[in-house]
Amino acid sequence: MGAFGAANGWDRILNYRTLNSGDKDMVGLDCLPGERVVQRAVLVRKKLSTSEGGGWLAGTLFCTYFRLAFVPQDAPRRKDDGDPVLLGDHDVALTSIEKVVAVGPSRAKHVTPSSSLRSAPEQLVLYCRDMRVLCFLFDRLTPPAQVMQMTYTLARAYQPLSPRTVCSFQNATLGNTEMKQLLSNRRRDPDMNWFEGVADWEAELERTGAVGWRVSSVNDRFEMAPSLPRYNVVPHRVLDTELKRTFAHFHEGRIPRWCWRHPAGSDLLRTAGFQNNIYHEKDDIRNLESLLFGGQQRCVVVELGEEMPTLGEVQLAHTRLRALCLGDISSSLSVPDEKWLSSLEATRWLDHVRCCLKKAAEVACLLRDGHLTVILQEPEDRDMNCVVCSLVQVMSDPHCRTRQGLQGLVQKEWVAAGHPFLSRGNCYRHRDRDREEAPVFLLFLDCVWQLWAQFPSYFQLTEEYLLVLQDSTHLPLYCTYLHDCQRERSRRSQHLPQSYTPINGWREGLAGDSYPMDPPFPPVWDWALWYSPERRERFTHPVAMPTLPLPVLNGDLIVSQSDGTPGRVFLLSRGGFSSPSFLLPWRGGGGGVMGGASSVPARRNHRLAPPPESSAGLERLLAGVATPPSGPQEPLLPLLFSPCVGIWRACYLRGALQAQAFCHPPPLPGHPVEILAREVEQLRERLASAGRVSGELETPDREVGLDQKDNNGALFLGPESQSSVFTLLDSLQNSDLAELESTVLFSAT
């Protein structure tokens, strides 16, 4: 069979002769509204992952213009009156496929649109963008023509991934009349806060008991700051007429805004960097300090631009992590077992995770002291501010550890705050946006998983939920991820092809605009549209919610400073405090009212600055002892030592070739991580059995137990009771098991 060109690959699929998919009895697949089957292969077996039970599952493989669907032999039929599920448990969207490898009797070959095969492959191995590796084995009775057509169809479908390809995929999936009607009848989740209107922000102020703050609509037309939301929470004393004068003092107009109030009385704010070339008048200074202090006497600025990883470092670390965890069966290059851990450390991904957790823990400890404002400052206020601000609330607010609470948190600190999801994800694969691409949101999800792994009983959401949220970022069908700010989402939802710039104002969009106006995209939080009820039940588990403080209506109490004396401003850097003169451009160093723009001192590099004053209390709290909250004001302080911040095994290693081996049944024993996990479970069963026998014989407990030796994760038998053994095994299974397994992964070799 000849090679197929890549220029019009997607159009060829759409124009390809499709099978009659009007009835499942004819093709065997429950098709979506308007969906058509392009190719089908019978007598196929899928390799199941360990979480799916392992082994092989027999069924039929279908390829449509939207997804690759695998239907088991005895799969139940969908009810006629039930809503369709876009992706089944064994389905994968075509745009989620990154590489197709055809495995033959003697070699494995990476298949591209220009490839040609001499014979039908025995297996297809699909590498997905969400770290999955899917393996399909064709039976000897499978018609070779079906195998060849399926292979070439997949090669044409996922490559090349261009803007035209993604737009065609979106319109083919959601653009037909039946699907538009289905999406128009969907209703939003009433139990979560979407942070799109004044009432949503007022509800958050009431929930947290914040006083002295109000919701401002001065940016209703996105004229003050195009990347900020319509509504922002500012101090009650600052009027809108005064607020308009402050936007020019900050990068892209991203002024200090209220995010969250701690039960102890502290407020968390976020802002962009100062525009130091702006002349600071006396009225402007008063309004600026009102924004920064928010009615408090103390203000701590946490500068994130110097200590947090850059976008390039995050992108490079994630690329190295993918290459290490996925591997490539079509290449002879592989990482030796004895070098796997050092290669994992060399990716620096876990270093970035640890850095974000450490900074968030420092901020959480500051807020717990009460009666101060903590301001997170980043040059553009659109990346690391989102990560740290969200992590602080997950650590300190039990509501954010529920499913609806975390979804509302993402809406508030990421979607509404203007995190550039489209640029960071670069799903349209624009070459001019390669420098802006970085999985910042995936870094945040990894940090949330680290907290969940160390304190699972404090979360209502499960690891299954974090996995589907991670997978959703790789599918370009959600309005949540297809825009960079609320202005773009509003413009698209209202079908107004306009854009705004501070110089040109509002103007009509160009004909070649890369944002398609049709079809309507659903939000990512509409889980019923994507997953079955059985899958959604695994997203949460019951957890006791603590008693929250009584809410105080916004505006009933205005907290003001006791006198007109300006409050003190500190800088938190490298775990200590300092009060540099260059922190506020209008204070000291010639940067006051009469200093002018030219006399403002340049910002110094905190990494080269002299060590700041030590904060003994903060260092003591972050000395490496995990602290579960003992009350509503106590944050979750995670362990930050290297053995405690482990790799997210269920996410990154679910596609490991050792676990999803491209072999014929019976499968190989499995990945060493899975083997170690089974050995730990067997040890638990043996200890439990020994305990029951001991109880029946009424013999006294023996002093047998396990003690944690040091930071390297070495474990030794020690003089502890049998109950301590069970307690330690529980903690290992829930928190440090992933890192412990990685530590001893290759000790046998």
Image (cartoon, helix red, strand yellow):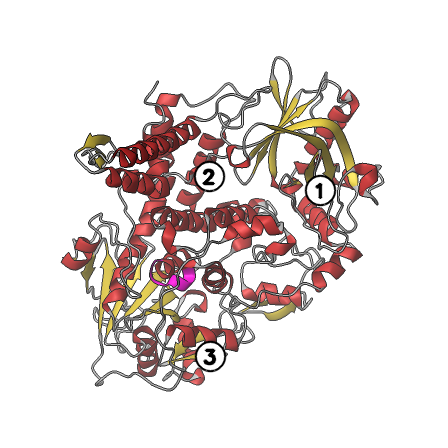
| Amino acid identity at mark 1 | Pro
| Secondary element at image label 3 | strand
For residue 216, the mark is: 3
| Number of the front mark, 2 or 3 | 2
- The percent coordinates of residue 559 (x first, y second) are 30, 83
Quarter that holds the N terminus: top right
- The percent coordinates of residue 120 (x first, y second) are 72, 19
Label 2 packing within 10 angstroms: few (<14), some (14-19), many (20+): some
- The percent coordinates of residue 307 (x first, y second) are 30, 51
Q: Compared to 99, does 610 lie above or below? A: below
Instruction: Please name the residue shown 44% across and 50% down the image.
Output: 445
- The percent coordinates of residue 468 (x first, y second) are 54, 48
The residue lying furthest to the top in this view is 106
| Amino acid identity at mark 3 | Ser
Quarter that holds the C terminus: top left
Which residues, given as a range, are shown in magenta?
A: 395-400
| Amino acid identity at mark 2 | Ala
| Residue linked to disc 1 | 76
Q: Earlier in the sequence, mark 2 or mark 3?
A: 3
| Residue linked to disc 2 | 650
| Secondary element at image label 1 | loop
Q: Taking 45 as reference, is 435 left or right?
A: left
Instruction: Please name the residue shown 19% across and 60% down the image.
Output: 577
Q: Taking 690 as reference, is 400 left or right?
A: right
Residue 194 lies in the magenta stretch: no
